[in-house]
């Protein structure tokens, strides 16, 4: 059944109705029933994908590697003295104090 161009308006709509029959509406219940009917297949496929994903994640080579170095030193001054750790605000704090 091929598509043919026909200039008569009435035949075009009939031809389209043949190509696209009335669409059925599906409800969530229909989809749940389909999954229930094929539950074993759904579970086998899901578990297979899960196992393959775990195997891949465990055996895959690392794509990146990171190193870090921490330098810890004695704090200079008091934590209450803002000028020691915020030098740009040290002068303003001294002006407020005076």
Image (tube, rainbow, N blue to C red):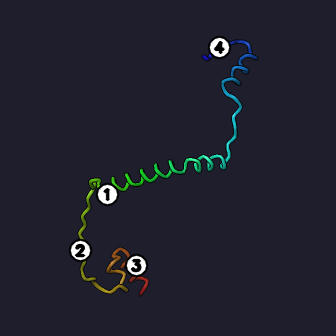
On the image, the x and y values in percent for residue 11 come to 73, 16
Quick one: quadrant of the C terminus?
Answer: bottom left
Mark 4 highlights which residue? 5
Residue 63 in view: no
The residues tagged by marks 1 and 4 sit, at their Cα atoms, a distance apart of: 59 Å
The residues tagged by marks 4 and 3 sit, at their Cα atoms, a distance apart of: 85 Å
Question: What kind of element bears circle 3?
Answer: helix
- Per the rendering, the mark at residue 67 is none
Q: Is residue 50 left or right of residue 34?
A: left
Mark 2 highlights which residue? 71
On the image, the x and y values in percent for residue 60 come to 29, 53
Q: Tag 2 or tag 1, which sits nearer the N-term?
A: 1
Q: Tag 3 or tag 2, which sits nearer the N-term?
A: 2
Question: Residue, x 73% and y 13% (percent of image)?
Answer: 8
Please name which of the two marks, 2 or 3, marks the residue nearer to the observer.
2
Please name which of the two marks, 4 or 2, marks the residue nearer to the observer.
4
Question: What kind of element bears circle 4?
Answer: loop
């Amino acid at each position: 059944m091929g598509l043919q161009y026909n200039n008569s308006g009435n035949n075009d709509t009939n031809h389209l109705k043949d190509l696209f029959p009335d669409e059925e509406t599906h409800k969530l219940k229909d989809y749940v029933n389909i999954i229930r009917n094929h539950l074993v297949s759904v579970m086998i496929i899901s578990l297979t994908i899960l196992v393959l994903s775990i195997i891949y994640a465990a055996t895959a080579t690392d794509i990146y590697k990171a190193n870090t170095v921490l330098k810890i030193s004695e704090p200079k001054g008091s934590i209450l003295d803002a000028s020691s750790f915020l030098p740009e605000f040290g002068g303003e704090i001294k002006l407020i104090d005076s």
